[in-house]
Amino acid sequence: MNYTLVESESELQARLKKGACVVAAGMTDLYPSGQLSHTDRDLLDITRVASLSGIIPTDDGWRIGATTSWRAILDYPWPPGLALLAEVAGQVGAVQVQNAATVAGNLCNASPAADSVPALLALDATVELASASGTRMLPLADFITGVRRTAIRDDEYLRAICLPAVPEPAASAFVKLGLRAYLVISIAMAGGVVRVDSSGRVEDVALSLGACSPVAVRLPAIEAALRGQPVSAALIDCVTPERVQPAIQPIDDVRASAAYRADAAVQVVRDTVAQMIERLA
Ligand SMILES: Cc1cc2nc3c(=O)[nH]c(=O)nc-3n(C[C@H](O)[C@H](O)[C@H](O)COP(=O)(O)OP(=O)(O)OC[C@H]3O[C@@H](n4cnc5c(N)ncnc54)[C@H](O)[C@@H]3O)c2cc1C
């Protein structure tokens, strides 16, 4: 395996076009996975490509470059509707991981327990994929296609994550359940974003749940039940097992049983709604 510190997107595109390459960012998934010890593909380190870095406000939202670390997400002054991203960032691994690891790497790794996915699904994120033959945009829901599977082609890389603005008044929340508070892979996690109209009712809401199915999912039955309701603690009771559990396919694994996950899923969504209500008060 050859290692290359790539200097520009044109160099990256040319190398990917030739084939037999692996894109590397923080390497916090790549290295522990052991994939590198039995591959003859070339490793393309993108962390020095200037055009892939940074969080940039756009006309209609934000653009998170591919090499943006969790630390940068944690430190960014997000408005209330996107502030859940900082909550995710503060709970990914520990400080060392947050400094090196990228949000884009978390998406491309496509683990069912990837903490960014429920939050970015609730934010209606799209990903920008680039290659020597052009650029295409995909909604995040179409990008992750299964356990550790994405729609990215071998000649492409993820250039940026694009987020629409969330008009205020708004609130957001991320709730993660693990076996302990830090350095832990999620048993279940939920992300939520709510917007309120001038009469204090829920104008729009997005809720999603991760680690309880092969790919994180939105929860349309709860979103529909909450829309149009006055903001009050009564909203928490709209989150019922009947509205959550049909959307998920929890499994037994080393972290939790499927039955425990099914119950925990309901609770993390209730906690997410409760936190959003508190933040709107
Ligand atoms: C101790 C530890 C704790 C962790 N805790 C958590 C946690 O709490 N929650 C969580 O969700 N994850 C956790 N992780 C997993 C990991 O840190 C995250 O998934 C991280 O965001 C991956 O980013 P990275 O930049 O290190 O990706 P890398 O390891 O560099 O890459 C991951 C995958 O994405 C591909 N890739 C990366 N960038 C691109 C790109 N721009 N275009 C195309 N392909 C790309 C790589 O080829 C590889 O397949 C933890 C890992 C460790 C080691």
Image: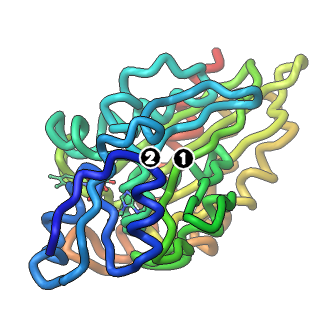
* Dot 1 amino acid type: Ala
Rendered image quadrant of residue 196? top right
| Ligand 1 lies in quarter | bottom left
Picture coordinates of residue 22 (x, y %)? 31, 70
* Residue at the image point whose x is 40% and y is 33% from the top: 87
* Dot 2 amino acid type: Ala
In the rendered image, the vertical position of residue 149 relative to residue 200, given as above or below: below
Extreme residue toward the left, this view: 37
Q: Evaluate if marks 1 and 2 touch, with contact meaning CB atoms under 8 Å apart.
A: yes
Count of number-bearing discs: 2
Picture coordinates of residue 168 (x, y %)? 74, 19
Rendered image quadrant of residue 33? bottom left
Q: Which type of secondary structure does the marked residue at label 1 adopt?
A: strand
**Nearer-the-camera pick, 160 or 124:** 160
Left or right, 136 with respect to 217, comes to right
Tell me which label, 1 or 2, sits earlier in the chain.
2
**Nearer-the-camera pick, 82 or 173:** 82
Label 2 CB less than 8 angstroms from ligand 1: yes
Q: Which type of secondary structure does the marked residue at label 2 adopt?
A: loop
Left or right, 101 with respect to 230, comes to left
**Nearer-the-camera pick, 259 or 149:** 149
Spatial distance from mark 1 to mark 2, Cα to Cα?
Answer: 5 Å
Label 1 crowd bin: few (<14), some (14–19), many (20+), radius 10 Å? many
In the rendered image, the vertical position of residue 230 relative to residue 1, given as above or below: above
* Residue at the image point whose x is 62% and y is 43% from the top: 162
The residue pinned by badge 1 equals 160
Picture coordinates of residue 144 (x, y %)? 54, 69
Quarter containing the C terminus: top right
* Residue at the image point whose x is 62% and y is 71% from the top: 247
Q: Which mark is residue 95?
A: none
The residue pinned by badge 2 equals 66
Picture coordinates of residue 66 (x, y %)? 44, 46
